[in-house]
Amino acid sequence: MTFLTKFPVPLLGFAAFSGTGKTTLLEQLIPLLIAQGLRVALVKHSHHDIEMDKPGKDSYRLRKAGASQVVLAGTHRSICFHEHEQAHDSQLSEQLALLNTQNLDLVLVEGYRDQAFPKIELHRSVLQKPFLYTTDANIIGIVCDQPIDAGDLPLFDFTQLQKIVSFILNEVIAVANNKPSK
């Protein structure tokens, strides 16, 4: 059993090639999931160097002074900066370890498509990329802009937001919690 399979909160990835619309779909799904009473976290993978801190600000200065972790706590949110000793493409397990799972019902993951955990594949025919489900046994559903024969996998159109939410409630949340959904 791996860290991802025994993670205490249901995980669901959204896997696709760049330009497919992962962020746009998640931006639409998150409010619908929250409306169902779920407390949702998101881990987004980026292959680029990220910098949210502003040069000259106290948190930036302290981080640059050598602190390996800096928590910037404000009245509306807290931000944790975690510096890697060496540049590397982080593993999903590293990012999940940063979450406070006691306050979560679901963790959505954008990216990390090559790691083994349950994922919904997004596919747009115009990109002319191969389907992921044919080589990834962790794909549990497909959102696609064209009808395809996906075997036993549930197939959704990008506009079927409520059906995708129902699928998440019934096949991810309820199954992970071993109980029937609402």
Image (cartoon, helix red, strand yellow):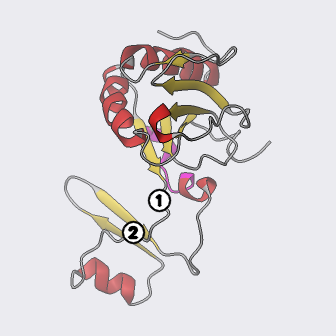
Is residue 55 found left or right of 165 in the rendered image? left
Q: Nearer the viewer, residue 58 or 26?
A: 26
Q: Quadrant of residue 134?
A: top right
The answer to whether one can see residue 109 in this image is yes
Q: Is residue 180 left or right of residue 165?
A: right
Q: Does residue 124 appear in the picture of this structure? A: no
**SS label for mark 1:** loop
Q: Which mark is residue 50?
A: 2
Number of numbered labels in the structure image: 2
Asked if residue 63 is positioned above or below residue 156 in the image, the reply reads below
Nearest the viewer among 62 and 116 is 116
Horizontal arrangement in the rendering, residue 62 relative to residue 111 (left or right) = left
Q: Residue at x 54, y 23 (%)?
A: 173
- Say which amino acid is labelled 1: Ser
Kindly identify the amino acid type of the residue bearing the numbered disc 2.
Ile
Question: What range is drawn magenta here?
Answer: 96-103
How crowded pointer 2 is (Cα within 10 Å; few <14, some 14-19, many 20+) is rated as few
Residue position marked by numbered label 1 in the rendering: 46
Quarter of the image that includes the N terminus: top right
- 104 magenta-colored: no
- Most distant residue in the bottom direction: 65
Question: At x 52% / y 48%, what residue is drawn?
Answer: 111
Q: Position of residue 146 (x, y in %)?
A: 49, 21
